Image: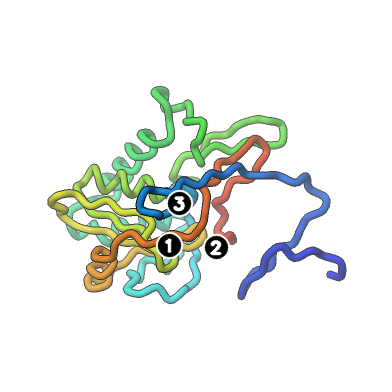
């Protein structure tokens, strides 16, 4: 429509300014590590849940990454990759429960951490705490998941490895690409080996975005980076 202000567009979406809504802001911070890389907590703490992903041509991705999962993409792929090694769906969910509470809740499981990405505050200031089953699993939770099970985890964003956990004697390994609010897990052993050998690369300039009162939280399937 004539007069609309386009904020961003890509191959399949156009984002326009809604002039009838109040402008909202996110607070961000960037931490530069001693080796010169940028800390990219925004990606690590973004809930991943998109159940109808597009194919972006990532190498070696498992077929289950493109399945319709009703916004349950991470547990679905974890079971596909680790189920053959004896991990049931229930066991995977219990491990994710543990990671969620360790990272994002206080001593009382009903009280969220002030910086939890699972808290949404509406226009009236009412806060609602969502669980990972409805909002999605973060990469930080996957790193914690790997620590619990002695599994190496490597997280890629575009062509950059932004984080990894490698135990001294890893039983298995996981590697995934993050795009928007979807995780694309790698199933090809050779691709996982290449990703594992790559060191953490210079990350793009990005800050962790912590939701301020009244700000919208990232986590919709239609949002991509």
The quadrant of the image that shows the N terminus is bottom right
Q: Disc 3 on helix, strand or loop?
A: loop
Q: Nearer the viewer, mark 3 or mark 2?
A: 3
| Quadrant housing residue 16 | bottom right
Q: Disc 1 on helix, strand or loop?
A: strand
Tell which circle, 3 or 2, labels the residue nearer the N-terminal end: 3
Tell me, for residue 157, which label it has, or none. 1
Q: Position of residue 62 (x, y in %)?
A: 33, 69
Q: Gap in Å between the C-alphas at discs 3 and 2?
A: 14 Å
Q: Residues within 10 Å of mark 3 (few under 14, many from 20)?
A: many
Q: Which residue is mark 3?
A: 40
Q: Gap in Å between the C-alphas at discs 1 and 3?
A: 10 Å
Task: Evaluate whether residue 72 shows in this view.
Answer: yes
Q: Gap in Å between the C-alphas at discs 1 and 2?
A: 10 Å
Q: Nearer the viewer, mark 1 or mark 3?
A: 3
Q: Residue at x 44, y 45 (%)?
A: 133
Q: Quick check: marks 1 and 3 in contact, CB under 8 Å?
A: yes
The quadrant of the image that shows the C terminus is bottom right
Q: Quick check: marks 1 and 2 in contact, CB under 8 Å?
A: yes
Q: Residue at x 44, y 43 (%)?
A: 132
Q: Position of residue 3 (x, y in %)?
A: 86, 66
Tell which circle, 1 or 2, labels the residue nearer the N-terminal end: 1
């Amino acid at each position: 429509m004539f007069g609309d202000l386009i904020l961003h567009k890509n191959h399949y979406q156009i984002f326009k300014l809604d002039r009838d809504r109040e402008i909202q802001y996110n607070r961000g911070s960037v931490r530069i590590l001693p080796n010169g890389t940028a800390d990219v907590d925004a990606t690590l703490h973004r809930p991943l849940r998109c159940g109808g992903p597009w194919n972006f041509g990532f190498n070696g991705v498992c077929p289950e990454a493109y399945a319709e999962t009703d916004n349950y993409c991470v547990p679905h792929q974890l079971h596909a990759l680790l189920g053959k090694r004896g991990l049931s769906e229930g066991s995977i969910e219990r491990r994710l429960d543990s990671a969620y509470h360790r990272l994002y809740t206080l001593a009382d499981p009903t009280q969220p951490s002030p910086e939890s990405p699972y808290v949404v505050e509406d226009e009236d200031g009412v806060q609602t705490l969502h669980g990972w089953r409805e909002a999605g699993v973060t990469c930080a939770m996957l790193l914690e998941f790997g620590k619990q099970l002695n599994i190496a985890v490597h997280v890629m964003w575009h062509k950059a490895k932004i984080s990894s956990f490698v135990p001294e004697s890893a039983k298995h390994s996981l590697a995934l690409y993050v795009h928007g609010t979807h995780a694309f897990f790698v199933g090809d052993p050779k691709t996982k080996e290449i990703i594992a050998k790559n060191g953490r690369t210079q990350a793009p300039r990005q800050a962790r975005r912590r939701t301020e009162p009244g700000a919208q939280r990232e986590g919709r399937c239609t949002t991509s980076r």
